[in-house]
């Protein structure tokens, strides 16, 4: 029973077609739907969405210096490269990545690859908005388009480390498994 003394967190329900959605540039193409953000929940601990990667496309190798990432693949087939080691992707594959773990995802199938992503702390939603173009559900995909000229600056201010010289933060010398 709620006596009014307990502080309750937010409850957010996002129905199909209600998420903010952004077309993504090459090499991933596809789009990302952002379902949960700090602005929606008041939480500073995570964000969540679903990314769709077009057939034959990929998410380039990258890493996060301060974030944990949880991925669950719900559609498509391909390969995940974690610190250069290939792992098959199929529906039901789940991947956890701690800070500094390099990762790349390749859609090797003939259909879209879809993955649910959770990032803690948040920020990936700001990256997708920064490099993408607003998308309305059901609209046809645009012709492939390039990343913005200021992508390194967008990476620096969101959740990426060391891409294209985009961060002055350095990987700790004590990291293992690389």
Image (cartoon, grey):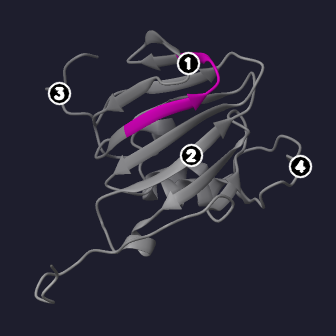
In contact (CB < 8 Å): disc 2 and disc 3: no
Mark 1 highlights which residue?
Answer: 90
User: Quarter of the image holding residue 176?
Assistant: top left
Q: In the rendered image, which quarter contains the C terminus?
A: top left
In contact (CB < 8 Å): disc 3 and disc 4: no
Compared to 44, does 108 lie above or below?
A: above
Look at the image and tell me whether residue 150 can be seen: no
Among the two numbered marks 1 and 2 on one chain, the one whose residue lies closer to the N terminus:
2
How many other residues sit within 10 Å of disc 3, few (<14), some (14-19) or many (≥20)? few
Q: Quick check: is 76 in the magenta stretch?
A: yes
Q: Is mark 4 on a helix, strand or loop?
A: loop
Compared to 14, does 177 lie above or below?
A: above
How many other residues sit within 10 Å of disc 4, few (<14), some (14-19) or many (≥20)? few
User: Given this view, does label 1 or label 3 mark the residue nearer the observer?
Assistant: 1
> What's the magenta region?
70-79
Among the two numbered marks 1 and 3 on one chain, the one whose residue lies closer to the N terminus:
1
User: Given this view, does label 2 or label 3 mark the residue nearer the observer?
Assistant: 2
Look at the image and tell me whether residue 23 can be seen: yes
User: Given this view, does label 3 or label 4 mark the residue nearer the observer?
Assistant: 4
Mark 2 highlights which residue?
Answer: 50
Report x, y in % for residue 49. 52, 51
Among the two numbered marks 2 and 3 on one chain, the one whose residue lies closer to the N terminus:
2
Mark 4 highlights which residue?
Answer: 140
Mark pair 1, 4: CA separation: 25 Å
Mark pair 2, 4: CA separation: 18 Å
Mark pair 1, 2: CA separation: 15 Å
Among the two numbered marks 3 and 4 on one chain, the one whose residue lies closer to the N terminus:
4
For residue 60, side relative to residue 139 (left or right): left
Q: Quick check: is 137 in the magenta stretch?
A: no
Mark 3 highlights which residue?
Answer: 173
Toward the bottom, the furthest residue is 4
């Amino acid at each position: 029973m709620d006596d009014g003394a307990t502080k309750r967190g937010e409850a957010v329900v996002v129905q199909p077609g209600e998420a903010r959605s952004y077309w993504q540039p090459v090499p991933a193409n596809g789009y990302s739907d952002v379902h949960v953000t700090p602005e929606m929940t008041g939480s500073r601990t995570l964000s969540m969405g679903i990314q769709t990667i077009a057939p034959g496309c990929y998410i380039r190798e990258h890493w996060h210096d301060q974030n944990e990432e949880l991925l669950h693949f719900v559609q498509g087939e391909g390969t995940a490269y974690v610190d250069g080691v290939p792992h098959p992707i199929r529906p039901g594959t789940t991947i956890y990545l701690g800070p500094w773990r390099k990762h790349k995802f390749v859609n090797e199938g003939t259909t879209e690859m879809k993955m649910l992503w959770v990032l803690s702390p948040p920020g990936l939603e700001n990256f997708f908005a920064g490099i993408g173009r607003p998308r309305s559900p059901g609209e046809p995909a645009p012709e492939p388009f390039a990343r913005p000229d200021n992508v390194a600056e967008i990476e620096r201010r969101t959740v990426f480390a060391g891409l294209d010289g985009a961060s002055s933060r350095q990987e700790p010398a004590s990291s293992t498994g690389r």
